[in-house]
Amino acid sequence: MIKLDILSDPICPWCYIGKANLDRALLDAPDHPFTIEWHPFQLNPEMPAGGMDRRAYLEHKFGGRENAVRVYARIAEAAEEAGLAIDFSRIERTPNTLDAHRLIHWAGIEGRQTAVVSALFAAYFTEGRDIGDAGVLTDIARAAGMDGAMVETLLAGQADAEDIRARDAHTRERGVSGVPTFVVGNRHVVPGAQPPAVWARVIEELREQMAGADAGKGADADTGPDAADGKEAAQARRRQ
């Protein structure tokens, strides 16, 4: 298997679109070689703990309402192409996602990470829920099969908060400035919300590489010491 590390933020629309495109490619290739792990990257690490009004946030980020509308028109188009029903009108606040990333981290420990990531995206972009709210996060954890009471207790404290911040900072130090970012086999970076066709090509190339590696191992086995001894014995028998 090959590790696929995904740097993402659950309030990032392009991350949601990128995941949807990847999911479509994986659905078409059920024997894909990936094992997936999600990693924290906050779009707004300086966001107040309680978040802020979404309209004010977007207008500040994009330099006014007209620019924000133009940017999000393109996002809405890409989301529709990816088969997503995003309802931006239901999103009232832009949250701080530190606690959401803590939940993703804990879900990874329990082998429920992708399910929780999917639920966070849906809660924010489809249902308009505040995924910075501890109650919402606890509900998502419980629905994914996690211990809701334990998650509620952890969210009330600062467990793993510094670790999440440190991992986020380390990612930026390594040159990542935007998400989604996909790292294949700890070697190759695939940036952005690539279409399913790109992932299909990546999967096919990986299959070819793995098949070539397996063939090489087979050739090594045929030419190893025992194989050489066998060939010499066969040649000796022919000489007799």
Image (tube, helix red, strand yellow):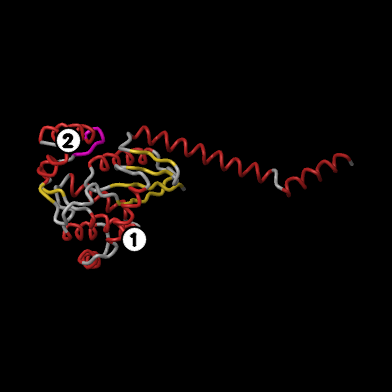
Mark 2 Cα shell of 10 Å, populated few (<14), some (14-19), many (≥20): some
Mark 1 Cα shell of 10 Å, populated few (<14), some (14-19), many (≥20): few
Towards the viewer: 14 or 229: 14
Element carrying mark 2: helix
The circle drawn on residue 72 is: 2
Across and down, in percent, residue 54 comes to 12, 45
Q: Residue at x 13, y 41 (%)?
A: 60
Towards the viewer: 114 or 60: 60
Q: Residue at x 23, y 58 (%)?
A: 99
> Over which residues does the magenta segment extend?
80-85
In this rendering, position of residue 108 left or right of residue 83? right
Towards the viewer: 178 or 113: 178
Mark in the foreground, 1 or 2: 2
In this rendering, position of residue 179 left or right of residue 93? right
Across and down, in percent, residue 67 comes to 14, 33
In this rendering, position of residue 97 left or right of residue 168? left
Element carrying mark 1: loop
Across and down, in percent, residue 34 comes to 42, 46
Residues under labels 1 and 2: Cα distance?
35 Å
